[in-house]
Amino acid sequence: MPRKSEVTTEQLTSYLSEHFGDDINTQMVQVACDNFNITYATATKRLRNFYVKRGVWNLTVQEKLENSYKAPAAVPAREDGDLIPSKDSTFVPFGNFSDVKKILSSKIFYPVFITGLSGNGKTFSVEQACAQLKRELIRVNITIETDEDDLIGGFRLVDGSTVWHNGPVIEALERGAVLLLDEIDLASNKILCLQSILEGKGVFLKKTGRYVKPAPGFTVVATANTKGKGSDDGRFIGTNVLNEAFLERFALTFEQDYPSTKTEQKILEGISLDYGVNDREFCEKLASWADIIRKTFKDGGIDEVISTRRLVHIIRAYAIFGKRMKAIEVCVNRFDDETKQVFLDLYTKIDANAEEVPDAPF
């Protein structure tokens, strides 16, 4: 019987195939370990190219990959075959948009972290920068459950065969696309599988033995409501403290605030016209209302803010119901009763005749 160090992958797989067939589980591997007098760790190391998932191996995986390797795209392309976002006619650039656009236009690998309160256009601005630059964008929404298999890829059962399936990160690497990691502060330590990628070095796919280098133009942008240090005030429950070494790999951090009152009014006017509503006065008053609320929030006078996203919700509700106060009320119902009433009372002070305004001018 061969000694531990002399047991080859071929000997191990031959024994397993002869005794158990091609589909192997943990118990079968343990039997082989006893036969060859090797540790379970040594056996799994020899079988790494046949790995399917935890406790499962398939001895035909490597052969199938070598003979007919085709990695299905993890991200479905649009009908025109690319992943370039569509331009939004209502988009109004503000804040760090020009800087983000310069970074992406340079096609230099330069990981960027964008932080800011919810609903202030962090993700939208990256999408529109890519749209204007005609750059492919692959967006991944991060959750606490996101792991290496979700990001890098793994084996999938396709038409009865087990084949490798690229994750969105590998797709972005190979295409030279912009990888957008949305809500990165919701991630667990499983996100650390991206360490080498955030250094611009590509990644070695240990399950297939293939090294993927980043194509020219590849870069990473992450968005978050926090700076990766968790949420002390409880506003963003579910956000986590990210590994310091992980955060250090982002070259710079942009702090994105809400747009100015004038810019926000322009955004709302564009969206209202897109819905066939022409009411510039309402857009102006909404922007002023949100600005007062945000200033009060910063001063500690209130615990909630009205985001740009929520103002857009109000405009859409206005297009549907045709009444200012009803549109505002149904969109602030998500807040607790006290906060909701404060918001409504404040708007009536800004727009004293809100209830008397006729239906929306379509």
Image (tube, helix red, strand yellow):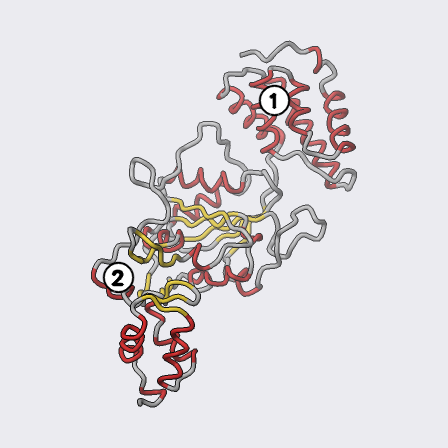
| Residue sitting at x 75%, y 36% | 296
Q: In terms of sequence position, does the residue under pointer 1 or pointer 2 come before the other?
A: 2
- Dot 2 amino acid type: Leu
Q: Quadrant of residue 265?
A: top right
Residue that lies at the very extreme toward the front in this rendered image: 19
Please report contact status of discs 1 and 2: CB closer than 8 Å, yes or no.
no
Q: Which mark is residue 283?
A: 1
**Of the pair 183 and 297, the residue shown nearer to us:** 183
Relative placement, left or right, of 65 versus 348 is left
Camera-near label (1 vs 2) is 2
Residue 210 rendering spot, x and y as whole percentages: 31, 65
- Dot 1 amino acid type: Cys
Relative placement, left or right, of 291 versus 36 is right
Q: CA distance from mark 1 to mark 2?
A: 57 Å
| Residue sitting at x 33%, y 68% | 50
Q: Callout 1: 10 Å neighbours few (<14), some, many (20+)? A: many
Secondary structure state at the residue bearing disc 1: helix
Residue 357 rendering spot, x and y as whole percentages: 67, 11
What is the number of callouts on the image?
2
> What residue does disc 2 label?
65
Q: Callout 2: 10 Å neighbours few (<14), some, many (20+)? A: some
Whether residue 29 is situated above or below residue 222 in the rendered picture: below
| Residue sitting at x 41%, y 32% | 87
